[in-house]
């Protein structure tokens, strides 16, 4: 099946620094990628939808200047958490969809811990 | 607004059958999906229903009733490895997928 990778899998950073998370579709072209955030024992909260070559669409309450998303190619999307703070500590998961298909293929997630 | 309701926890024994229900309210509806997530892992796709009826894939089946805004995931011949969280999700008219809060399934020996 389709494979989506994320890098890094785990990151610890100091408060105030920026962290970039990469999401790659390895064996298919992802016209749409999604970024989710998940707190322990909670659901996945959609942060933004990213279409290749266009600006990301952010969900209500998600600060676009804090969570910068770039979808530069059909196989790569990046999420940059700028000036991270402890409350940004979470599990960030990307997913990719091929065309208008239903199935979303999820990356393995990135655990961010901001000290 | 959009909302999905599913039970927070379900416990069952190995070999049994368990049904996880999901009711939804969305602005536009294109289908109901189910995902499985083990602790610390990423969600994996289980099934998708766009039309009313039952879809069967091995031990897992999923049902949808669009008129009732209701669906369920049926897991048969439960195994210990089925212990996980199960999320129902709907695809709205914006082609976004919105997830329910998840149901934690505990399978006992």
Image (cartoon, grey):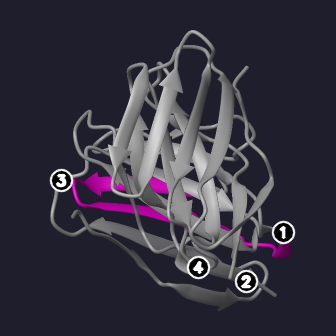
Could you tell whether B93 is left or right of A102 in the image?
right
The residue wearing badge 4 is B80
Is disc 4 on the same chain as disc 3? no
For mark 2, give the secondary structure: strand
Name the mark nearer the viewer: 1 or 3: 3
Q: Is residue A50 visible?
A: yes
For mark 1, give the secondary structure: helix
The structure residue drawn at horizontal position 63% and vertical position 46%, both measured from the top left corner, is B19
- Count of numbered marks: 4
Give the CA distance from mark 3 to mark 4.
35 Å
Q: Are marks 2 and 4 in contact (CB under 8 Å)?
A: no
The structure residue drawn at horizontal position 54% and vertical position 47%, both measured from the top left corner, is B74
The residue wearing badge 1 is A87
> Residue A27 occupies which quadrant of the picture?
bottom left
Image x and y of residue B42, in percent:
51, 69
Could you tell whether B66 is left or right of A96 in the image?
right
Image x and y of residue A31, in percent:
26, 44
Image x and y of residue B80, in percent:
58, 79
Q: Is residue B108 above or below residue A48?
A: below
Q: Are marks 2 and 1 in contact (CB under 8 Å)?
A: no
Residue A113's disc number: 2
Magenta highlight: main SS: strand
Q: Chain of mark 2?
A: A
**Region rendered in magenta:** A68-86
């Amino acid at each position: 099946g389709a494979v989506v990778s994320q890098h890094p899998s785990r990151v610890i950073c100091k408060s105030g620094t920026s962290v970039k998370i990469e999401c790659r579709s390895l064996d298919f072209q992802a016209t749409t990628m999604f970024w989710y955030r998940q707190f322990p024992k909670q659901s996945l909260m959609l942060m933004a939808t990213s279409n290749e070559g266009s600006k990301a669409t952010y969900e209500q309450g998600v600060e676009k200047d804090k969570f910068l998303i770039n979808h530069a190619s059909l196989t790569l999307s990046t999420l940059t958490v700028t000036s991270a703070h402890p409350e940004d500590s979470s599990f960030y998961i990307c997913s990719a969809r091929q065309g208008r298909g239903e199935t979303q293929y999820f990356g393995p997630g990135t655990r961010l811990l901001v000290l | 607004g959009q909302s999905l309701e599913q039970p927070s926890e379900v416990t069952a024994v190995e070999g049994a059958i368990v049904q996880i229900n999901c009711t939804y309210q969305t602005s536009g509806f294109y289908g109901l999906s189910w995902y499985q997530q083990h602790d610390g892992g990423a969600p994996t796709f289980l099934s998708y229903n766009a039309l009313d009826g039952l879809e069967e894939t091995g031990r897992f089946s999923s049902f949808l009733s669009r008129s009732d805004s209701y669906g369920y995931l049926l897991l048969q011949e439960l195994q210990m490895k089925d212990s996980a969280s199960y999320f129902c999700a709907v695809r709205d008219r914006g082609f976004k997928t919105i997830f329910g809060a998840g149901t934690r399934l505990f399978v006992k020996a």
